Amino acid sequence: MELLRILLSRCVALFRGRRLDQELDEELQMHLELAMEEHLRRGLRADDARAAALRDFGGVTQTRERYREGRGLPLLESGWQDLRFGLRHLRRNPGFALTVVLSLALGVGATVSVFSITYAVLVHPYPYADADRIVYPLLADQSGRLDWAQLTAAQVRELATSDVVEKLSARINRSMALTDHDFPESVTVSCQTGDSFSMLGVPALLGRNLGPADSPDGQEPQPVLMLNYRFWRRHFNGDPDVVGRTLELDHKQYTIVGVTGPRFGWGGNNGNIDVYLPQKLSNDLPADVSFYVFFKLRPGIPRSVADAKLQPLFEQFAKEVPGNFPRRFTVKVQRLKDGTLRDLGGTLDLLFAAVSLLLAIGCANASILLLARGSVRQHELAIRSAAGASVARIFRQLLTESLLLSFAGTALGVVLAYSTLGAIIAWLPVNSFPNEADFHINVPVLVFSAGLALLTGVLFGILPALQMVRPEINPMMQTGTHKIAGSVRRTRLHGALIVGQIALTLLLLTAAGGAIEGFVRMMRVPLGYDPHNMVSVSIPLHENTYTRWAERVAYFTRLRDKVAELPGVVSVGISTNATPPDSGWNQTFALLGRPVNEEQQALVHLVGPEYFGTLHIPLLQGRLWDAVEVKRGATLVLVNQSFAERYYPHGDAPGHSLEVPGLKGQPPDMLAAPGSDGWMQIIGVVADSVDDGVDKPIRPAIFMPYGTFMFMGTQLLIRSRSTPETLLDSVRKQIAAVNADQEALVHGNGELEWWIRQEPAWARGRLLSGLFAAFAGLALVLAAVGLYSVVSYSVVQRTNEFGIRLALGAQRRDVSKIVLASAGLWVGLGIGIGFGLSFASSRMIAHWVENSRDDVLVTTAVCLLLVAVSSVACLLPANRAASVDPMTALRCE
């Protein structure tokens, strides 16, 4: 009380314009002595007591100089004092500081993780020079479907002369075998034309890049190759002396001239290229040899201009090789990252919005805790203000403490982001992001984190600072007044923050509920086939092998029969392009006796007669073809139930005929059975099975014998009695028994259940549901902590009031009702606003979350969950208020 009297007199003196520096020194010195006596009574030694008193009040001389009217310390020195005081204050309150830091760290960690992935995937995914000018042409048909443009060697050379092209890269990917081992090992090879590496502008890690001299015009390419970084680490254990050694592919020796860099993934959609070979580009190549092309646009040429200039050129190409082009198309030049933006951009944007909400909830929680803590610091701030501290100085001190907390929370958040980044990346859809993407906490991410720390410090610190920067001195002079009722303005701010927290938490919970429900619905989609104990094994053919139709049919049949002999195998079916859940080849077809319709399309599958029994797909009508009919090239087909219901609704599909004019044989790579370019009879209808992904409706499908059209390879679908992985070595031995040079390629673990998990829609659903659930759970915890803090603060502020009520005869349950009623108003208002936000954003969320839809049950369940958690957070302080001892409360100051 004595100190307050001194400070009040000082305020009056300052108001009247009198200078009382000497008097203030004497009075503060006297109070310092009183403070020392208080510390001595607590058991401290004399020196320790004086040091503690000086820490409390900053020293008499420093206090006078700091608060002297019209003067102040230099900004650097005063800033250093603010920093030291802030650290000391937080060190004295470790529980409060830790709670605030953890609240921020959760939001910052999630934000930094998602930003790191967004930066690596969307902002800077490629290490190539001028990556935004490297493009590739796609062809959009009348339905808007995009497909790759495949060009012949002559067309590639002509495209390279276009005035929009600076440099061009063309490639052909194929499978070869390492033939210097006991069993051939499959190697994925990308044959690149001469300017490919110079267009990319990336130096080799070891040795040199392939160049034009390795594939001179009019000559066969040189027997040299370049190793991909991952293959070099896997096959050569990262040997730095690998350059100059040889590698045997298909019984031919190649000299290793270089190794690519770690982020180099050019040539494959999923980064599976092992080796790069030079590819010649001459007009004498057969017309059936097609290339995928990439080129670098000349500087200053927009893609729209390139589209317009390339359209007539590609229309000319279509007249030369009509089988490689749709009947009507539009050229669409795409950047390297456009496909990623299309497939994953919306998902990452949605996740970034979610973590931004989580960060906002964390900031609101920190503000609530700071406001609650501010009630304890009213005396301190009143002393500072009365002693002459300016509003700016107090504001700066409080903001400094907020920034300290924000930078500590950001530092911990970066650590959390670094530890969780790998787990999030593992959940990203396979093949949905560039293989070159570099996922780690890099300099741009750290700069973003530092900016985030500054922003969060201002966001959660400015409101409490503004509320506490002008402490009310007169009420502080009246004993207990601040205990009866807190500041109405501060109470309203508490309520507004809680309402915002509850609303944002409900929005996140609703989004998480929708994502989880959509993912669960996707997992329950009837597949129409049984993927359990099923494995897929690819059989790639070597170049210039089995070039006659009958020979290739017999070879595939022998491989199937040999694998079927294994004791652990139940059945084996040949599936050239029919491995579900995303299978078939989209083709236009015609029905005999009906007008030709170009929009009439179905998925064409090339399978063996055992395919349906192996996958447990039932036959609904008619019959299957047999091995004899496959061997003689019978032009017989089956259709699925969707096809039959759409085109033959009366159930009379068997006996009719159809034609697929787009399928043509292109020897020696693609061999067609005699008569396959004519009408084929429908002999049966099979049940529907998922053929266009687990997130899309089943499309009409046509099943042809695998011998109708045979590519340079096929697949075997094997059903086993136990885990199929145990059979893979035996399968390879059986295949080698037929042909010692034949390799067997298994993607992942080969199981069909693994193929389902690799579906982009399935992976996106798992990613969104898992991360949204985690973010929503964290938001729920933060909201509960914030609500608990506010209600606890309110109980402390009203302790004296509750004591009076209890002393006058109020029941304890009445006190609990008062506490719960005030908190219930905030929670109810927050739920109402959150419900409106959820409804407004439901369409946007449903656009990016597969199988998500407006569901009243999900929203109701989320609201009930939030009410339950809020009730628990409020009941604890409410019970504490009800258990207040009236006599203790009446004496509360």
Image (spheres, rainbow, N blue to C red):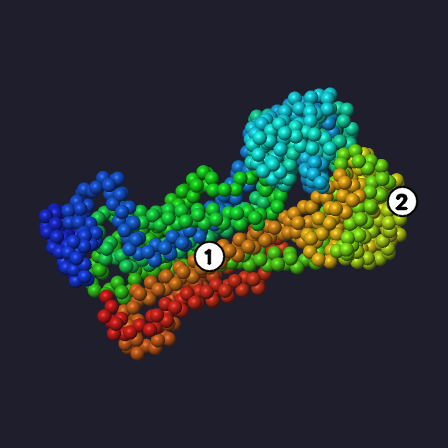
Could you say whether the residue bearing mark 2 is in a helix, strand or loop? loop
Quadrant of the snapshot with the N terminus: bottom left
Residue 290 percent across, percent down from the top left = 73, 32
Q: Which residue is mark 2?
A: 632
Check the image and report above or below for 287 versus 882: above
- 298 displayed left or right of 366: right
* Identity of the residue drawn at 87% across and 51% down: 626
Question: Which quadrant of the figure has residue 207?
Answer: top right
Could you say whether the residue bearing mark 1 is in a helix, strand or loop? helix
Residue 736 percent across, percent down from the top left = 76, 43
Check the image and report above or below for 100 versus 680: below
Residue 712 percent across, percent down from the top left = 77, 38
| Nearer to us in this view, 453 or 285 | 285
Residue 478 percent across, percent down from the top left = 20, 63
* Identity of the residue drawn at 75% across and 39% down: 741
Q: Is there CB contact under 8 Å for labels 1 and 2?
A: no
Quadrant of the snapshot with the C terminus: bottom left
Question: Which quadrant of the figure has residue 568?
Answer: bottom right
Q: Amino acid at mark 1?
A: Ala
Extreme residue toward the bottom, this view: 809
- The Cα–Cα distance between marks 1 and 2, rounded to whole angstroms, is 66 Å
Which numbered marker is on residue 779?
1
Extreme residue toward the front, this view: 182
| Disc nearer the start of the sequence (1/2) | 2
Q: Is residue 583 visible?
A: no
Which numbered marker is on residue 281?
none
Count of labels shown? 2
Q: Amino acid at mark 2?
A: Arg
| Nearer to us in this view, 135 or 259 | 259
- 365 displayed left or right of 482: right
* Identity of the residue drawn at 44% across and 51% down: 107
